[in-house]
Amino acid sequence: MRRMPFTYAVRPDADPTPEAWCFAFVDDQLVVPDSEATPFAPQTWQRFEASQTAQHYLGRLDGIDCRAFALSDVPAGCKRMPLRAAMMALGEPLMNVAGCAAQVIEWDRSHRYCGVCGTATEPRTHERARRCPACGHTSYPRLSPAMMVLVWRAAGSGAAAGSRTISDEAGAALEKPNGYEVLLARSPHYAPGVYSALAGFVEPGESLERCIHREVLEEVGVQVTDLRYYGSQNWPFPHSLMVAYTARWVSGAIVRQEDEIEDANWYPLDALPKIPPRFSISGHLIRDTVVALGGPEPQHLASPVVAR
Ligand SMILES: [Zn+2]
């Protein structure tokens, strides 16, 4: 698909486009065309106004308005679809706008009353915020930063790889395929058989780096170093910002945190278990790191990632 830039905005800075990308939700599910033959496409957005309980302008995608709606009922000719499945079907860049829509709708729904004094809040027109007319307390859409980290090491370590970087290691690994292994774990709520990188929410007062060291030690009992930023993904389940890293193992045998981690193991690059697909950032992080370390592109796909 051609890349189309999405420009986030709270209100149109030009005349509204006659049709819009409409991300309408009934409860937490996205409204999509009833028939497989009908594509998800820009449409006359006024059709949703009859059953809307909330509407938000989101911005423009390739010059076309994007709007989010909360609806009381599913309109004729439409059906509802779980957001994760809908995002996988839409692909980029629409899936990202759908995630934005879901977060704006959910934030708006859950901030109708002031958290300080209980008065009904009012939407602001010039920014995405709801303000209390009694005490002035203002609420903005929530984002919860979380780290994700793929830990790697020379196979069978003990023999740690000194102070070399991941690119140095990849160069060495080209001459020695499968010379490295990665630490993958599964949480009890993952789909059966699926393993992924470690992840955890950032606590108040904590940096991303500090969070990585703490979570890795808590979840699997190992020490890491050589943190390298990989990328980030806004993840609307319900409002996470996933920030992904790689890290090199330093010391420690795997000791699971019983209530968080069902299983965790070191895997050679050519013998991975089922991993998430290239949809969530975990799927990208694991595949790209395995290849960077000189391993084969992993073929094991799992969908959905989480059995909900
Ligand atoms: Zn208040």
Image (cartoon, rainbow, N blue to C red):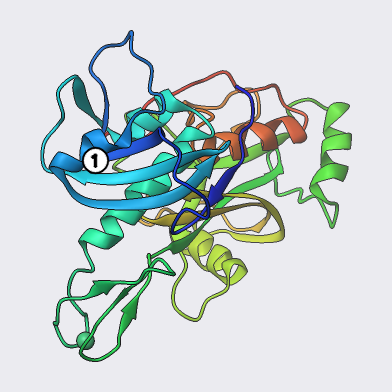
Q: Quadrant of the C terminus?
A: top left
Residue 112, position in %: x, y? Answer: 19, 69
Please name the residue that numbered disc 1 is placed on.
25
Q: Give residue 260's quadrant in the image.
A: bottom left
Q: Is residue 216 above or below residue 17?
A: below
Q: Is residue 33 above or below residue 70?
A: above
For the point 57% across and 73% down, the residue is 207
Residues 298 and 6: in front is 6
Q: Is residue 133 left or right of residue 67?
A: left
In the displayed orientation, state which residue is furthest to the bottom.
135
Q: Ligand 1 lies in which image quarter? A: bottom left
Q: Is residue 64 left or right of residue 239?
A: right
Residue 60: tell me if it is visible: yes
As helix, strand or loop, the secondary structure at mark 1 comes to strand
Q: Is residue 60 above or below residue 113?
A: above
Residue 220, position in %: x, y? Answer: 48, 55
Residues 243 and 165: in front is 243
Residue 260: tell me if it is visible: no
Residues 59 and 188: in front is 59
The type of residue carrying mark 1 is Phe
For the point 82% across and 37% down, the residue is 170
Q: Quadrant of the N terminus?
A: top right
